[in-house]
Image: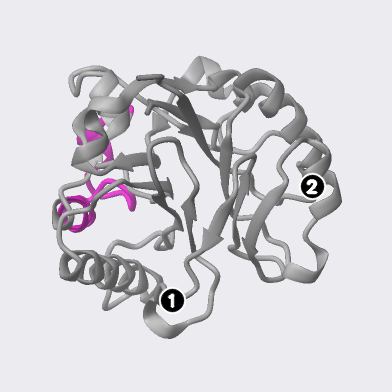
Amino acid sequence: MTTRSLRIATWNINSVRLRLPLLRDLDAQLRPDVLCLQETKCPDEHFPHEDIRALGFEHVAARGMKGYNGVAILSRIPFTHRADDPDWCMKGDCRHIGVTLDAPGGPIDLHDFYVPAGGDIPDRELNVKFGHKLDFIAEATAWFAAHGEAKRSVLVGDLNIAPLEHDVWSHKQLLKIVSHTPVEVEALTRWQNAANWVDALRHFVPADQKLYTWWSYRAKDWEAADRGRRLDHVWVSPDLRGSLARHQILKAARGWERASDHVPVLVELAL
């Protein structure tokens, strides 16, 4: 039986038009078959389809709005759009897009999420943004739970939560900081357990080792400080666990000119 690889990458690009040249660098280094973007900040009518196709991504699905949010899936392999997936919290804020990939061995459902960041105060009574974050995750959890254990599925994106102790530079100091609070971690864990998702990055990197995908713009020297968080995730369904072949976190991308504060993350499946 011939094994074929499927390379799926995810990146919070923080404006697809502003950082379009960086997609060439990403593609040269990772050569993904599928690239999922978050925070594209681009209404659909202005999405740079021609430039994307020039990179070899013939198949594109995008949901965007001016100045905020936005998600897109760029693919070298055909897919069909999952048009019936929910509009989470009924806000129409372009935080999720799903497709079904024409993958080796059979179709694979792929979900690309941009979870609300949640503001600065971890209290839903004092901060409506934090409440929205928790409500968004709860709604997604219930939806996936209703569909049972995920099968031939991949979920990626900027989930804006670093759940494990070594997903942040200091577990103790970040316990009251949005993205690592116990209530957020519990919510994300429930979502992961709802469909028995496998944390693909921690499949490769033990939980007792530091693992980051985001470094703040606020640091004068992000690399020297290395105060990172793992906000970007790849989950796979249990039936794909055995296909996990390798991962790559393109940390060097944080040092690119006009870089995003997130870096690209890739997982390769041997199907």
As displayed, is residue 138 above or below residue 16? below
Q: SS for tag 2?
A: loop
Q: Amino acid at mark 2?
A: Leu
Q: Amino acid at mark 1?
A: Asp
Contact? badges 1 and 2 (CB < 8 Å): no
| For residue 98, above or below residue 50 | below
Along the line of sight, the residue nearer the viewer: 89 or 126: 89
Q: Residues within 10 Å of mark 1 (few under 14, many from 20)?
A: few
Which disc, if any, is residue 84?
A: 1
Task: Please report the bounds of the magenta region as a residue range.
Answer: 169-192
Quadrant location, the N terminus: top left
Residue 249 vs residue 100, the one in the foreground: 100
Residue at 60% of width from left, 42% of height from top? 77
Residue sticking out furthest to the front:
1
Against 46, is 174 above or below? above
Horizontal side of 208 relative to 161 (left or right) equals left
Q: Which residue is mark 2?
A: 18
Upstream in the sequence, badge 1 or badge 2? 2
Real-space Cα separation, disc 1 to disc 2, in angstroms: 30 Å
Nearer to me, 8 or 225:
8
Q: Residue at x 41, y 72 (%)?
A: 85
- Image quadrant holding the C terminus, namely top left
Kindly state the secondary structure of the residue where label 1 is placed: loop
* Rendered location of residue 203, percent (x, y): 24, 25
